[in-house]
Image (cartoon, helix red, strand yellow):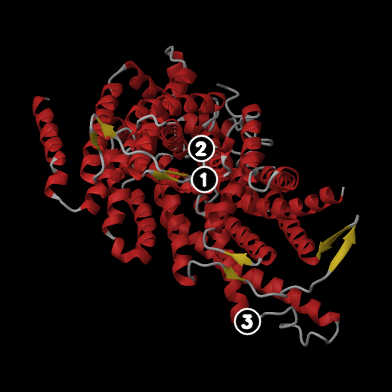
Amino acid sequence: MRHAWLWVAAAGVAWALFPVVVRNAYWIDVANFYGIYALLALSLNLIVGEAGLFNLGHAAFYAVGAYTTAILNTRFEIPTLVLLPVSFAVAAAAGAILTRPILHLRGDYLAMVTIGFGEIVRIALTNNLFGLTGGPNGIFGIDRPVLGSFTIRQPAHYFHLIWVIVAATIWITLRLQRSRIGRAWNYIREDEVAAQAMGIDPVRVKLLAFVLGAGLAGVAGSLYAARMTVIAPERFNFWESVVIFSMVVLGGPGSIPGVMLGAFAMWVLPELFREFAQARMLVFGAAMVAMMVFRPEGLWPSALWLRAARAYREVGPAPEATSSTAQANSPIEGMAAPGPQTRGSAHG
Amino acid sequence: MQLFAQQLVNGLTLGSVYALVALGYTMVYGVLRLINFAHGELFMLGAYLTLSATTVLGLGSASALGGAPAAGGGNVWQGAVLFLVIVAIGVAVAVAAVGLALERIAYRPLRHSTRLAPVVSALGASVFLQNAVMLIYGPRYQVLPEGLLPAWSAPVFGIEITLLQFVILGISVALMVGLYLFVQRTALGMAIRATALDHEAARLMGIKVDRVIQWVFVLGPALGAVAGLLIGLYYRQINFTMGWTYGLRAFTAAILGGIGNIPGAMVGGLLLGLLEAMGSGYISVAWKDAITFFVLILILIVRPTGLLGERVAEKL
């Protein structure tokens, strides 16, 4: 265990030297946005990976964080660094308020509602809600972060700000994974009924996942606003949610190194192939399919997830995954009692 | 009143197209529990292949297949009918082939993995198809030729309903009724229903489950392709990103009706079309999608499995 920490520390120091070694501002900025996406992927991982909740509208919380920072900074001149925790709180509150009424929805219905939220938020921002969001052009002139008398301007300085927060998030996620909450999330993910029988309140636990995940996405939004100094609603569209979602699933849901790798694959690799601008996205789409076909559990899955995926393949889906009925796993029972409210629904 | 009637017709026209696309989502979901996020792209492909077909066949006016334009109505109508039948069948077959390939390459290997993996694979396929079309046809809007159907309209309740709207409604409703009867009355339809109920049980009863799934990936994309053709005729401007927008709306329609439920997709589609038309007619065009999603969320809060979806979790 001590050796593992040594390795992590060494990797951290090496990464901290990245902007010193690579003096190219463009690539440092690629690393900056990698940090922001890693933060987003880590935050969505709490919802999708740990708690197993389908969320395809994560860009909404990212947007709430970015707009909180942008509006409060440009209107009241509150320093952007102060707005970092404020954005966390506002996005977390948005997560609680938006998802509380829909937490009883199952799998794909939840996915649909989160897509709906994402779109509603984007449309509201585009339509200049309360005259605050600046419409389709967004908000510009956001202040750069100030530390004492030092203003963060260069990509290399942003690099350290962003990656310190990513490191903190990784640490928090690690702590969460080993905590009561983390284990409750995993129980809910594996078998909601069994978890309930053990005294876990599914609504409370799911809500907590959404609150924390949304809050961290809000921090990512705040960092994005501080880095860009300009934000526009189109940045936070459905595609953005898809990318974040894919980072988690491609990397390995519930696995921190996996999620970091997923964010790398989805953000940095396409950057490397920029010169093939035209066909780049075509290859990207094909690569998404290929990665899933050859590594359906993700590039670097967690042991728990891998075990669940293997069991799923051998025994079949857990009852909750397909429908309510327990006989889904047993062909004999399934045949004996396909009552009207059992599985499936293609019938009229 | 006139606005209401006009929006009613517009809504039903659009809604019937949404319903056609929604059927593809709902059928795939019914048998595979998979949200086929690439289905919108198949719809978009239908619109683009219609464009190619009209170019290849040298169509540009309704008379091209039926003789000289001035030679009396009969020929013009013949041309239009021929166009609709030949091009629609061709496009549907081509898109169905793409649908089959999609199933084989992107979905079948993932049939037994966790439920997250096929979603990402579907999203990847969607990105691939979108960019393939963009590379072939270019990123700009493409315009379908004018006058593929005769410009004819009939006055109903003080508003004019165009031939195009009649055609869209007629073809969509005919296809929907046809699909419903097919699924209810034929042996293959029964096999599809059985597979949707329980793969293992269906297999034990001698149903070739793989074959059934392939048929679902033929029927859904074929219907989606016809919907793409109809939307192409309706708006005439098509773009490689239209699959996302329409796909999302049609998927919303499928959820609204209760995903996995065929009549539900039809009801959901028509309802969504009406909602959108009334929303943009009476409230605001800019907010119409937001209104739609808002209503969807409200409905799901009250009825967690959609309007016609069966109650899940009754036993839990």
- In percent of width and height, residue A123 lies at 56, 43
Q: Which residue is mark 3?
A: B57
Callouts 3 and 2 on one subunit: no
Is residue A340 at least partly visible in the picture?
no
Give me the chain letter of mark 2: A
Residue A111 badge: 2
Question: Considering the numbered disc 2 on the image, is that residue within a helix, a strand or a loop?
Answer: helix
Q: Is residue A15 left or right of residue B284?
A: left
Query: Would you place residue A246 above or below residue B225 in this image?
Result: above
Q: Is residue A148 left or right of residue A114?
A: left
| Residue at x-position 41% and y-position 50% | B121
Quarter of the figure with the N terminus of chain A: top left
- In percent of width and height, residue B37 lies at 50, 50
Q: Which residue is mark 1?
A: B35
Q: How many numbered callouts? A: 3
Quarter of the figure with the C terminus of chain A: top right
